[in-house]
Amino acid sequence: MQSLRMATLMTSILIVEDEILVAMDLERILEDAGYRVAAIAADQKEAMSAGAEVDLAFVDINLRDGATGPEIARDLAKRFGVHVVYVTANPAQIGEPAANSIGCIRKPFSESAILAAAASAGASQQAATGHEDIIRL
């Protein structure tokens, strides 16, 4: 239990989502569980400027600047080593997943799926891949 709490406190998260109500719901779920949400980004420019500060990113596909989510995810993983969880209603649009992708959660999402994915970034990926709402890529 102590190691999970330490992983939670050490995980800094970026939410890449242009729908503010969805972003705020993700932020609430994560912060209530003890995670630190470093930033919410609605487009590629905002996401990349926050990338160096985070361990994990929850990334939507269709953003304010178009269907840039897959490219953002790959860039975050390549440039900063960020683990990625796609959160989208359109998983077929992901294409080639980011190197550090944990999986994909379909919208509408469950709180338990978001928390399982977040926990896997601080521990092993088994926590996420064993959850029924997380699609392995």
Image (cartoon, rainbow, N blue to C red):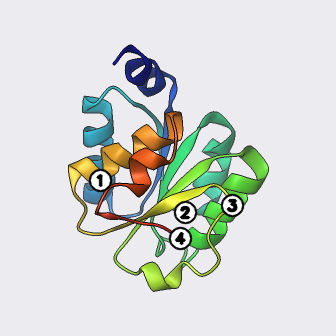
Please, what is the three-letter code of the amino acid marked with disc 4? Answer: Leu
- For disc 1, the marked residue is 113
Residue 21 coordinates in the image, percent (x, y): 25, 57
Q: Is residue 39 above or below residue 85?
A: above
Q: Secondary structure at mark 2?
A: loop
The residue singled out by tag 2 in the image is 43
Amino acid carrying label 3: it is Ala
- Asked which quadrant contains residue 73, the reply is bottom right
Q: Which residue is mark 4?
A: 137
* Cα distance in 3D space between marks 1 and 4: 15 Å
Badge 1 element: helix
Residue that lies at the very extreme toward the bottom in this rendered image: 92
In the rendered structure, which disc, 1 or 4, sits on the residue that comes first in sequence?
1
Q: Nearer the viewer, residue 112 or 77?
A: 112
**Residue 50 in picture, x, y percent from top left:** 61, 43
On the picture, is 57 further left or further right than 20?
right
Sequence-earlier tag: 1 or 3: 3
Query: For the residues carrying marks 4 and 2, which lies nearer the camera in this image?
Result: 4
115 or 63, which lies in front? Answer: 115
Q: Nearer the viewer, mark 2 or mark 3?
A: 3
Q: Position of residue 24 (x, y in %)?
A: 28, 48
Q: Is residue 105 left or right of residue 68?
A: left
Cα–Cα gap, marks 1 and 3? 20 Å
The amino acid type of the residue labelled 1 equals Ala
- Distance (Cα) linking label 2 and label 3: 20 Å
Residue drawn at (64%, 46%) of the image: 82
Residue at numbered disc 3: 99
